[in-house]
Image (cartoon, rainbow, N blue to C red):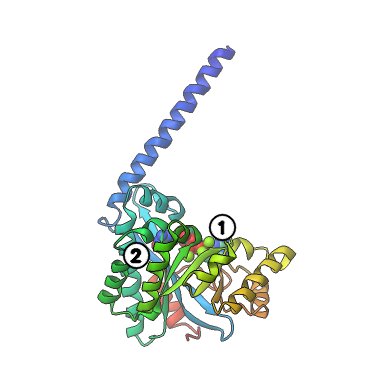
Amino acid sequence: RAKQKGGNSVKLYATKMNEQVMYRVELERYLRKALEKQECFLVYQPLLDLMTGKIIGSEALLRWKHPKIGFVSPLEFIPIAEEIGFIHELGRWVLTEACMQTKKWHDLGFDSLMISVNVSATQFQHPTFFEDVQQALKQSQLPAHCLHLELTESSMLRNMYYSIHVMKKLQQLGVQVSIDDFGTGYSSLSYLKNLPINTLKIDRSFIYQLHQDRSDIAIVKSIITMGHGLRLKVVAEGVETAEQMKLLKRLKCHYAQGYAIFKPLSAEQFEQQVLQGNVVIQ
Ligand code: C2E
Ligand code: MG
Ligand code: MG
Ligand code: MG
């Protein structure tokens, strides 16, 4: 009996494995078609200037909704897109779409709005990446200084010299470079000195318990102080409470982003709630 039971569980395990493989294969197949089937769209999470209390722009966040499986998180499909080489096409689409949308808002009169776009490691290392950025700016007519690119520590470290070269070229164009999820990678302070960056985005894992965790306060305080010293802007992401926001303001953090301010919004919601709302725009 025991043997039979064991046999069944092995079989069950095998079935489950098989299901997972099938799901993954299906996901890859669906993902390759996601753009042409127009299943992708961007949402925009506003960025607040803590000193002035004004919204300065937003971060574009990619969404994919498949008719059969529903929403898939970017945390799940971005790594797959990287593996199957689809990230370049997807990344180009995100860049162009984000720049075009922001330019539309400029044309409505909000011409100082910035847009922050996430760039995956593989996308960043691709030989055409710099041209992709140029092309998106040209096509949209968005001023380069309004575009921020969010890179992670790991994507810069993958190929340091080449990364620095590309980042410098981007900055010469006027584009701003941010380190996303700062503090979660292999942050060596010596390379911070050499990297051409404009902004540090403190990872939300340091923010979500900020008001009740002494270590988090110490870490966040240090990052902000270091940012000021290096003449970098500092953004706190994942700000969920008014308390956290007050504390960040007191610590002289420049910008904040999170559910306490705004959740990610559709383009229409952004227009209604931010541009036409009572919100003060910088
Ligand atoms: P991220 O760039 O660090 O983006 C912040 C994530 O935190 C977003 O999740 C956002 O919805 C979420 N968030 C914002 N405020 C709060 C808050 O107050 N509390 C909590 N708990 N969460 C908050 P999302 O949209 O699921 O994106 C996850 C990650 O996927 C992003 O992390 C980014 O690394 C990646 N991603 C999203 N869009 C793109 C894209 O267009 N290209 C690339 N390469 N990666 C993307
Ligand atoms: Mg980001
Ligand atoms: Mg982040
Ligand atoms: Mg993060």
Residue drawn at the location 31% of the way across and 47% of the way down: 30
Q: Which mark is residue 196?
A: none
Q: Nearer the viewer, mark 2 or mark 1?
A: 1
**Mark 2 residue element:** helix
Residue 187 in the image: x percent, y percent?
57, 61
Residue behind label 2 places its C-beta within 8 angstroms of ligand 1: yes
Task: Check disc 1: other Cα within 10 Å, few if <14, some if 14-19, many if 20+.
Answer: few
**Mark 1 residue element:** loop
Please determine whether, in this image, residue 112 is positioned above or below residue 6.
below
Residue type marked 1: Tyr
Q: Nearer the viewer, residue 145 or 282?
A: 145
Residue type marked 2: Val
Q: Nearer the viewer, residue 90 or 130?
A: 130
Residue drawn at the location 56% of the way across and 86% of the way down: 52
Residue 172 in the image: x percent, y percent?
37, 78
Residue 235 in the image: x percent, y percent?
55, 73
Task: Check disc 2: other Cα within 10 Å, few if <14, some if 14-19, many if 20+.
Answer: many
Residue 139 in the image: x percent, y percent?
25, 74
Q: Which mark is residue 186?
A: 1
Residue carrying label 2: 94
Instruction: Find the distance from the CA under tag 2 to the CA under tag 1.
Output: 27 Å
Query: Can you tell which quarter of the image residue 28 is in?
Result: top left
Check if mark 2's residue and mark 1's residue have beta carbons within 8 Å. Answer: no
